[in-house]
Image (spheres, rainbow, N blue to C red):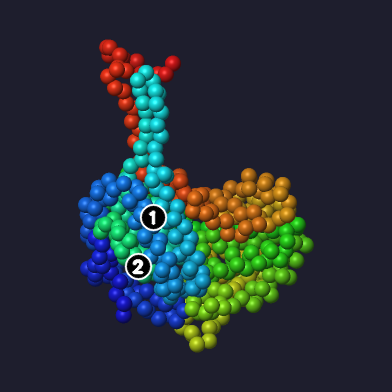
Amino acid sequence: MREIGHFIGGKHVPGKSGRTAEVFQPMTGEVIARVALASKDELRQAVENAKAAQPAWGATNPQRRARVLMKFLELIAKETDSLAELLAREHGKTISDAKGDIQRGVEVAEFCVGIPHQMKGEYTEGAGPGIDMYSIRQPLGVVAGITPFNFPAMIPLWKLAPAIACGNAFILKPSERDPGVPMRLAELMIEAGLPAGILNVVNGDKESVDGILDDPDIKAVGFVGSSAIAEYVYARAAANGKRAQCFGGAKNHMIIMPDANMDQAVDALIGAGYGSAGERCMAVSVAVPVGKATADALMDKLIPRVESLRVGPSTDPSADFGPLVTKAHLDKVRSYVDLGIKEGAKLVVDGRNFKMQGYENGFYMGGCLFDDVKPEMRIYKEEIFGPVLSVVRAKNYDEALRLPTEHEYGNGVAIYTRDGDAARDFAARVNVGMVGINVPIPVPLAYYTFGGWKRSGFGDLNQHGPDAIRFYTKTKTVTSRWPSGTKEGAEFAIPTMQ
Ligand code: NAD
């Protein structure tokens, strides 16, 4: 049995708390590792290492910090195949999807290679008589990231790459369900030349999260996970005087207008609804056809496609999606399907009893499709996070626009149409953070920022892009005057530029 401890001060450290969690291989249902769950003392040990190492790293010039990232990117590129396999075995997604998970994280590290440019401040010569003014960005010190199970490479990279590039020391508390890839990323960083103590991985659960939230030396916390925990982390971090950006759950709608190309819309729904078994915060979980004719045409094409989805083990290159992450999560998703039937939605494709031959203990389920879902049903209001797509029929465009706008989540949304005017109006008025126009999963690229609205995101700055540099640095503004510009005598009124 593989034992996974922590990565502190540049090396592997065994867990000492006596508490562990099982790590499953979802495609077979076996336990493949045991991961240590840190105590507050173990978390504190990581913070002390990080605190001791950070000043020298923060003082290292940004080009040299960027070179460590360049080398890290080179190392990741060499072992993408083995990393993707490790990821797929612990998470359950297919290997090709696991490669995408790594790549979308790599792209943020690539963006951070430009840190010497991105951290540049501003300068005004002659802001007043003999006065120059400038601003500089400085690292915060020790910062932390708490990440979910569903993107075990991408989301840790979204946090650790900008934090480290900005000169901070970083503590990563990854999901206890798939810690293998985050641990390997930390090893690769050391191999790339990152000083020991700048990237620490502390495995754990609520105890280590609370340790992070209460630690006086941790200055900022980035969280991604479910909304209830995001809100808790945001409130407790703020109460302790920390910066926090906390991203939560989602219920992403895709509107299908009567003029949409129906084949493209169906392809988009199949990929975005069922890829990664629906375990993506940007998965489309609600399809909203506008008008009865659109809805009927959509269902005619969608039903056979959902029925013919290929579910398979993560290592099967022909599988559309693999198993869910754990048995507990599989049971939860199945129970939502049971609930939908009770609530009166029409289950037109039922994948609940799918069994994978030869992998009977794996956590598989087939694609499920509900028609006639109503906004007051719990299966509409709550995040299911599985291969279950709900169709809510809207009478007209205004009703369709209202659904994502009034939903408590506001992560992503898409509209399929050939009418530029409708698309433009939709993008302007919908109350959601990321919008796709004929693009089903509108995850912005690394040089833009990623963040949902309403209960999908707590805090002001988004992830990656320029916001990440702002989040992981503090701005200092210097006003300077040399004796030749200094007037005689004291001034008692506030100086102005009149
Ligand atoms: P989760 O909330 O269960 O766990 C996230 C992190 O919080 C993990 O590191 C976990 O160990 C920790 N945690 C769990 N329970 C805790 C508690 N009671 N107190 C303190 N910490 C706790 O989320 P998950 O199941 O790993 O991930 C799936 C969720 O993440 C979905 O809701 C999905 O929509 C969301 N997600 C959001 C985004 C986004 O950018 N908005 C991206 C990916 C995933």
Image mark for residue 161: 1
Q: Position of residue 289 (x, y in %)?
A: 70, 60
Label 1: which secondary element: helix
Residue 386 seen:
no
Disc 1 residue type?
Answer: Ala
152 displayed left or right of 283: left
Kindly tell me whether residue 314 is visible in this rendering.
yes
Q: Quadrant of the C terminus?
A: top left
Residue plotted at (44% across, 72% down) = 81
On the picture, is 213 further left or further right than 437? left
> Residue 155 or 128: which is nearer the viewer?
128
- Residue 120 at what x, y percent from top left? 39, 40
Count all numbered tags in the image, as a single digit.
Answer: 2
Q: With respect to residue 46, does 353 lie above or below?
A: below
Residue on which disc 2 sits: 184
Foreground pick, 480 / 157: 480
Point out the residue furthest to the right here.
293
Amino acid type at image mark 2 = Arg
